Image (spheres, grey):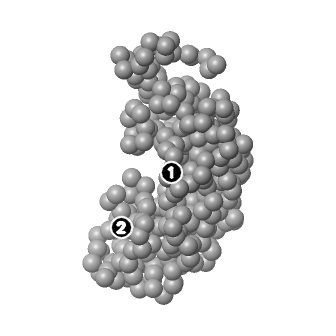
Amino acid sequence: MIIKYNEPLFRPPAEAESLIFQVAYGCPHNTCRFCGMYKTVRYHLRSKEEIVAEIRRAAEYYPDTTRIFLADGDVMALPFDLLDEYLTVINESFPRLSRVNIYANGSSILNKTKSQLEILRHKKLNTLYTGLESGSQNVLDRFSKTESVEDMISAIQLAQMIGFRCSVMILLGLGGTDMQKEHIEQTVSALNRMKPALLSALRYILIPGLPLPHGFQPVSERQAIQELYHIIAGLQLDRTVFRANHTSNPLPLAGRLPADKEKLLLQLEEEFHSNQVPDQYRDFPIEFL
């Protein structure tokens, strides 16, 4: 066996062609009630000796590797010395390496010093995939996400200043019907302060076996389209690649902001006004009620 994997193994869609090393199993947080990715896995680090041997062995079979993804959840939470050593070995082993990408939480980014982050960036750590989910602290608290919105904003600002590419994910519908307006407005506010290089919008899907917060009522597909419209309409980003083409989304979208903003809004309006929408939903509300 060249590389050892322990299922379930997750990676972002953009890492489909990357060589993956699973340096830890599970997620060090694993409290979020909207995420079922690692609920069956007890978080623990793999043996350093095993990982180093695995990297060197894989380099013999895949010497031309240019992209590597380190799994599992929030690899930035690893102790700095350990993550630094892995990156050193990876750089030594793969002469054509261009980038190493990971999942990272805001708190784990801020737990590294600026100089430590600069060292990691110098060793080709490149894209940090981060879940904002919602800019509303009330929404995050309701779903037991142990992150502060303000910390996540500060973390993305710091990371991008150092030179990391930050890919930020939001979840449409996470506010439910009762907190939808707050979810939209505060998510827009957080994203406008972050100004992420990459932004992905997925739709929140109920996970079997994970209890919903008390009183939570999911939004309809039409409300999800409406929600995405208002989020895009409120964004004031300078240079962001935007994706809403995950299979969970009611309408696949992709573009660059701000250049494609009006085109994206028009696509959403056309979908909302299409013949598939019942008459009572035909008047698209530009002002959210």
Q: Nearer the viewer, residue 48 or 174?
A: 174
Q: Amino acid at mark 2?
A: Leu
Reading the chain from its start, which is encountered first: label 1 or label 2? 2
Q: Is residue 285 above or below residue 72?
A: above
Q: Which residue is mark 1?
A: 207
Q: Nearer the viewer, mark 1 or mark 2?
A: 1
Query: Percent position (x, y) of residue 215?
Result: 67, 39
Separation of residues labelled 1 and 2 (CA atoms): 29 Å
The percent coordinates of residue 82 (x first, y second) are: 57, 78
Number of residues whose C-alpha sits closer than 10 Å to that of mark 1, classed few (under 14), some (14–19) or many (20 or more): few
Q: Residue at x 67, y 53 (%)?
A: 144
Where disc 2 sits, the SS reads strand
Q: Closest to the observer: 81 or 11?
A: 11
**Pointers 1 and 2 in contact (C-beta within 8 Å):** no
Q: Which mark is residue 4?
A: none
Left or right of residue 233: residue 255: left
Whether residue 197 appears in this view of the structure is no
Is residue 9 or residue 84 the one in the foreground? 9
Above or below, 30 against 200 in this view is below
Tell me which residue sits at (61%, 47%) in the image.
212
Query: In the picture, which quadrant includes the N terminus?
Result: bottom left
The residue lying at 35 percent from left, 77 percent from top is 3
Location of mark 2 (residue): 19
Amino acid at circle 1: Ile
